[in-house]
Image: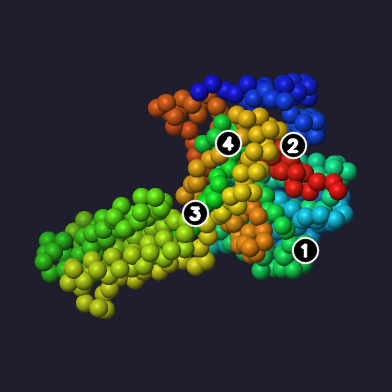
Amino acid sequence: MNALPVRSTPALAALGLAALGLAATSVPVRAEAVTDSIARDLPGLMTIYQDLHANPELSYQEVRSAGIMAKAAREAGFTVTEKVGQTGVVAVLKNGEGPTVLIRADMDGLPVVEQTGLAFASKKRGTSTAGVESGIMHACGHDTHMTAWIETARLMAKRKSEWSGTLVMIGQPAEEVGTGAVSMLKDGLYQRFPKPDYTLAFHDSADLPAGQVGAAVGWALANVDSVDILVKGLGGHGAYPQATKDPIVLASAIVMKLQTLVSRETSPLDPAVVTVGSFHAGAKHNIISDQAKLELTVRSYSDETRAHLLDGIKRIARGEAIASGLPDNLMPDVSVKDPYTRATWNSPEFTQEAVADLKTRMGEANVVITPSVMGGEDFGEFRRADEDHIKSVIFWVGGADPQKLAAAKAGGPPLPSLHSPFWAPQADKVIASGSEALTLTALRLMPRK
């Protein structure tokens, strides 16, 4: 697939941004003004991005990042509150009567040692709240999210004459551990600050060409459960297996039987994933251990499918243990980690309207409907807090080199994914398209009366 042609705007041309890959289109004056503003601001935004990228912070430790976002919002004229949900930022700009729109960016990095080779690559190390010391990297692109958030705040503040309502912009901690959104809500986000009618966000994507905007209609991201299974047995000498109850054989049977939860018990039209990501047992060649440990990730969309999968895991683990002849006191222990990340829902009609509007403003080829994915994201909690009232969409914004992405899809070398130590999105395109999509959508939702 070839790169998409470039939208023709003087400011983009002046900055040499032809590599944005955005298709030519006839765009309303307001949209062009936003595009031009972003193009002029982009060099400064890239400085912010590179600083954030070089200085990532782990979940609930985003003090420096939050300070940068809070300072930028204050300078733009927002009323800013810090330390909401531990390290979260809430910036409010009231501008007359009208709806309330919430725009979120997540702030935390990942415990990953960066291997991108970028001149501004992170060399940071830190210790997580779980006490694990590691390198730290923005391997999920939250640095692009924060930078686009700053630009969106500035653009909306400069265009107060074009909209009427209340804008609530939040910097969210701890998305990577799945609890940051709930932490902010429990800290009174909707009681201390205006409750939104609409919630907006975007996430960079390794599966879309750089600068392209996408959105799924309905389920966008999945429920994410972590399940631990402790498989018990009777250990002994490897030369005398008949005198033991081998937990490795039992755990292997459990792993194989778990595959039928999706393939034979779940409708092919109902996406679900049960993956055994870790299998640990034993310490020596000739010793049969007395236990084995399995770690699973379980993905689903509906509450009903989630419940069926989790119940099925417990049923299969116990059933295989009984079939192996284990007594009741040696039944496997199955523990489901709490809390879990709940699935994210893009309000269907609202999402379709947003995509249709952005197509007219950013170009037909530059905005697409994307499939649902089985990744997880806690942005959906902001809608779930009042799901009968709040409409929500999270966009994807492509970060992959278009030529390399096309080659990879044609069977060439695979590209790094999110969470990879090699993930280095084309950040200028992500920031430009992300801030444009958020700004244009917010302006549409809050028209000047």
Q: Determine whether 340 is above or below 52 in the image.
A: below
Asked if marks 2 and 1 touch (Cβ < 8 Å), the reply is no
Q: Secondary structure at mark 4?
A: strand
Say which label, 4 or 1, has the lower sequence index: 1
Quick one: 22 or 197, which is closer to the camera? 197
Q: Which mark is residue 222?
A: 3
C-alpha span from label 3 to label 4: 20 Å
C-alpha span from label 4 to label 2: 26 Å
Q: Nearer the viewer, mark 4 or mark 2?
A: 4
Q: Secondary structure at mark 2?
A: helix
Q: Secondary structure at mark 3?
A: loop
Percent of width and height locating residue 5: 63, 21
Say which label, 3 or 4, has the lower sequence index: 3
Q: Which mark is residue 368?
A: 4
Q: Residue shown at 55%/27% (left/top)?
A: 402
C-alpha span from label 3 to label 1: 28 Å
C-alpha span from label 2 to label 1: 28 Å
